[in-house]
Image: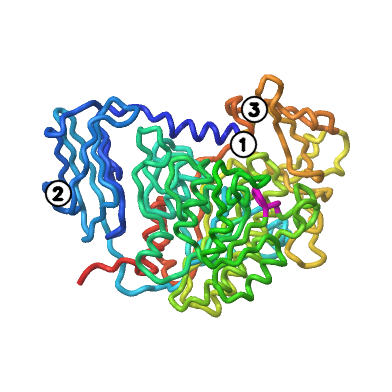
Amino acid sequence: MRRLLAALALTTCLVPAANAATIYPLDRATMLMGSPFDLKVEFDKVVKGEDVQVTINGEPAEKLLGKKPAFIEKEEGVNASAVLLRAASIGKPGSYKVEAKAGDETKTVTWDVYATPATAKAKNVIFFLGDGMSVAHRTGARIMSKGMTEGKANGRLNMDDLDRMAFIGTSSTNAVATDSANTMSAYMTGHKTAVNALGVYVDRTKDTLDDPKVETIAEAVRRLSKKSVGIVTTAEVEDATPAAVVAHTRARADKPEIVGMLFDVKPDVLLGGGSAYFLPKTTPGSKRKDDKDYIQLFKDAGYTLATDKSELATATGTNTGKILGLFHPANMDVTLDREFLKKGTVAKFPNQPGLVEMTKVALGQLSKNQDGFFLMVEGASIDKMSHPMDWERALVDTIEFDKAIGVGIEFLKTHPDTLIVVTGDHTHGVSIIGTIDDNKPGTEMREKVGVYASAGFPNYEDKNGDGYPDRVDVSRRLAVFSSNYPDYYETFRPKMDGPFEPVVLNEKKEYVANEAYKDMPGAVFRQGNIPKSSDSAVHAVDDVVLQATGPGAEGFKGYLEESDVYRVLVDAMALAPAPK
């Protein structure tokens, strides 16, 4: 995973020079009326300022935007010119043709600026994001949680009954493949961007924090309404998905800076892991390189701090209405470890709340605002456990995510002016192909895989009725495999001693199969089918499935780009009606 993130960073830092001028926002961008954005034109060579013309619908850009873009003769580190205007906006809906000229360089793009309806359909929006959640995760969670008899599920997940659905395209602006940063950023801004980027278009300069910005949904809610904002995640709160609600950087690894961006927006409720990036560098365990103490800054801003489940329960009784919950210095432990096996870092952090508890607390606090709220809830470790192909942990976390959705559905029953959206940000190449039956004869685990009629049905049980399988290491369990993988040893077994680590770094700093699994009875070496630099399975390009219910959910249908989803959200809240 570390090497994967490094590769993601490389893809957006090494941007090749264009053959002609580039305009940001890109062609076919859709923008909320009045939403601030940075206009940038990158020329392919040094040009003269007097030769530069930037027009919008045939008129000088400054006539529409109110100020003239600045000319930069040579961008830092680039032997080429540019034009830049920060915090521009367009106050009237319509189609806008933007043309940039300098000598023989010409570029034309078209933007669609839209207004929202005048009347809100939804006062509240709950956006549930299952990171990496693919169809197989849903299927596996349903079978594990509810069981199956004679080919029919014995029960349904909460998400199964959401009545609106769409297929969502996830590709980035620079590749058909994608990561959690650019995908969630598209949802949260209405603009597609490059792999690794959040709330910006990726330009050619080296600085990760100077790229052309677009407004995030949290900023729009703050600017245009009196609604509250909440972020709940089982990852670090600075991680790609929660960061996308507020952040502007082309590098998702800018986590210390993202904490500052969270503080700038100040979500009313912020719950998850990642406390190491809030602490000044002098504090043991800090991952900051400065003396800023963001925990103290949040407290000074009126937030109640919670660091474990008990403190979170206490914080719900305060009158500040603002809660900062940081329950782990890094990502929180997954459900299977936290609630059942007590592995991972649970011995060190034994009182972490789960996603269900955090969602309940967030809804309880945010619903006190009579103007409504926007809440993002992420089931982060569906993805984090799919990368190392730890399928039992990924599926149990999917069950927990679905239980959090159930909390949202219960809230909807008493707050019918709430839109609920459930989706993934991207998929994994994961499939369920049958079962693995330990009772089949022989020692070769590969031969214990049942396909077609020989698969039968798994024998998970839920005797206590909590919705989780009593055990994941049952004798006949789901056979789950990834379509892509590094070199590793497939054991065909749940990892009961802790999260799966399929690869390790050798003395040459190369990723190789983890020999710790080599001698497990029946283990099979699988030669990877992705680059040797990969230390885990990677994301897939497949569409994700979005489901929704509540007022405004009818906007989700057919095929949509992730950037289209933003428009449905802001339309439902009527954030920017057209002027009369």
Q: Amino acid at mark 2?
A: Asn
Q: Position of residue 185 (x, y in %)?
A: 44, 50
Side (left or right) of 293 relative to 70: right
Going from N to C along the chain, the mark reached first, 3 or 2, is 2
Mark 3 vs 1: CB contact within 8 A: no
Residue 57's label in the rendered image is 2
Location of residue 363 in the rendering, given as x and y in whole percent from the top left corner: 56, 71
Question: Viewer-proximal residue, 452 or 340?
Answer: 340
> What's the distance in space between the residues labelled 3 and 1, CA to CA?
15 Å
Return the residue at label 3. 528
The reply to whether residue 148 is visible in this rendering is no
Secondary element type, mark 1 = loop
Mark closest to the chain's N terminus, 2 or 1: 1
Please say if 462 is above or below 496: below
Residues 41 and 379: in front is 41
Badge 3 element: loop
Rendered location of residue 236, percent (x, y): 60, 50
Please name the residue that numbered disc 1 is placed on. 1
Cα–Cα gap, marks 3 and 2 = 52 Å
Image quarter hosting the C terminus: bottom left
The residue range painted magenta reads 328-334
Dot 3 or dot 1, earlier in sequence: 1
| Location of residue 403 with respect to 387 vertically, above or below | below
